[in-house]
Image (tube, rainbow, N blue to C red):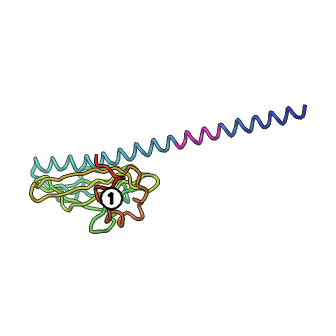
Amino acid sequence: MKNNKGFYLTDIIVKICIFLILINIGFIHITKQNEKKEIKEAKIIIYETFSTYRTKAFYEKQKYIIKLNYLEKKIYISKYNFKPIEILQLPNKLNYTTIFNRDKQDIFIATITENGNVTPSFSTYIFGYDNIAKYRISFYGFEIIKYLKINIYYNKGDKSASYRGIVKYHQSWNKDNLFWKEE
């Protein structure tokens, strides 16, 4: 009789362990799915903001100022008077930075010119929950064509593109990097 009680207790403990392992796997899966969704959302918000206002500026012959405030996780769009005409919220759990003049910028202001160009040229990185860069969005202003060009690159597995070391990483980055692919 005593042997059966021990067997039942062991059986219950094994079942509880299996249940907890399954819950943990489910939690990890849900977290990864949320991260992917937020990264995609952030990429779309940033890209669409510049794309939309590039087109508006070109057709309206109007300057737009875009302030990327990564401390607040917001994008402010304004005209020449800096009074926001639109404020967009970026996903809060992610980190972002703009690299400009070999430095990391937590607040960055870009101008979309009347002909749809951007000044200055810069790159923005979107980081996942692990603080590894998942996307690099580069904005180029060209004097010849006078129209903003946007390149989007996604990280296929480069773990060295960390939030803390992104300035050094950015300086050594080249588009032929096997871990990054242009969309």
Q: Secondary structure at mark 1?
A: strand
Q: Position of residue 98 (x, y in %)?
A: 31, 60
| Residue 23 within the magenta-colored segment of the rendering | yes
Picture residue at 19% right of the left edge, 49% below the top? 53
Q: Position of residue 123 (x, y in %)?
A: 28, 58
Picture residue at 32% right of the left edge, 56% below the top? 177
| Residue 177 within the magenta-colored segment of the rendering | no
Taking depth in this image into account, of 5 and 83 the one nearest to the observer is: 5
Does 67 appear above or below 40?
below
Q: How many marks?
A: 1
Which quadrant of the structure image shows residue 117?
Answer: bottom left
Q: Position of residue 178 (x, y in %)?
A: 34, 53
Taking depth in this image into account, of 84 and 179 the one nearest to the observer is: 179
The prevailing secondary structure element of the residues shown in magenta is helix
In the rendered image, the residue lying farthest to the bottom is 102
From the viewer's perspective, is 23 left or right of 57? right
* Residue on which the image places disc 1: 69
Q: Amino acid at mark 1?
A: Asn
Name the quarter where the N terminus is drawn.
Answer: top right
Taking depth in this image into account, of 79 and 114 the one nearest to the observer is: 114
In the rendered image, the residue lying farthest to the right is 1
**Residue numbers of the magenta segment:** 19-28
Picture residue at 85% right of the left edge, 34% below the top? 5
Q: Position of residue 174 (x, y in %)?
A: 29, 59
Which quadrant of the structure image shows residue 13?
Answer: top right
User: How would you rate the neighbour count of disc 1 (Cα within 10 Å): few for under 14, some for 14-19, many for 20 or more?
Assistant: many
Picture residue at 31% right of the left edge, 61% below the top? 173
